[in-house]
Image (tube, grey):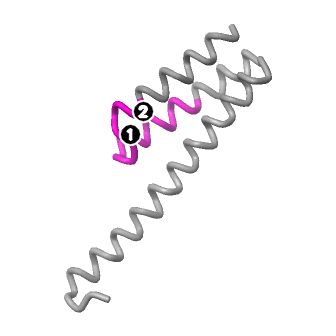
């Protein structure tokens, strides 16, 4: 354990941020799985609705610094391509 007060604070802040990032990542992964499930079931309407929700969540995560901009762009492009393939 750190002895210096600022180091102790950094540990607490890092834990708090890691927990927030983990929660956001989990939420995004769940949204992506919903889109994939709809694509596999060939349900176009559900897939499009889930895709909109997933894009929104991923964009928010990117603006908060959880994901890199290019990572989000790549994931959105792949999901959109999958949804468009069943339409």
Asked whether 9 or 72 is in front, the reply is 72
Q: Is residue 79 magenta?
A: no
Q: Which residues are magenta?
A: 53-72
Q: Residues within 10 Å of mark 2 (few under 14, many from 20)?
A: some
The N terminus: image quadrant: bottom left
Q: Secondary structure at mark 1?
A: helix
- Residue marked by disc 2: 72
Please report the residue visible at 27 percent of the width from the left and 74 percent of the height from the top: 10
Nearer to me, 50 or 36? 36
Secondary structure that dominates the magenta span:
helix
Secondary structure of residue under mark 2: helix
How far apart, in angstroms, are the residues tagged by discs 2 and 1?
A: 7 Å
Report which quarter residue 51 is drawn in: top right
The image quarter in which residue 61 lies: top left
Tell whether label 1 touches label 2 (CB within 8 Å): yes
Say if 47 sits above or below 70 in the image: above
Q: Position of residue 69 (x, y in %)?
A: 34, 34
Q: Which residue is mark 1?
A: 62
Q: Earlier in the sequence, mark 2 or mark 1?
A: 1
């Amino acid at each position: 354990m750190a002895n210096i007060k600022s180091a102790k604070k950094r540990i607490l802040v890092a834990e708090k941020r890691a927990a927030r990032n983990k929660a956001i990542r989990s939420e995004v992964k769940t949204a992506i799985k919903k889109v994939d499930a709809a694509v596999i079931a060939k349900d176009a309407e559900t897939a499009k609705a889930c895709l909109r929700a997933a894009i929104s969540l991923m964009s928010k995560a990117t603006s908060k610094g959880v994901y890199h901009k290019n990572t989000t762009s790549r994931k959105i492009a792949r999901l959109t391509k999958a949804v468009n393939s069943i339409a």
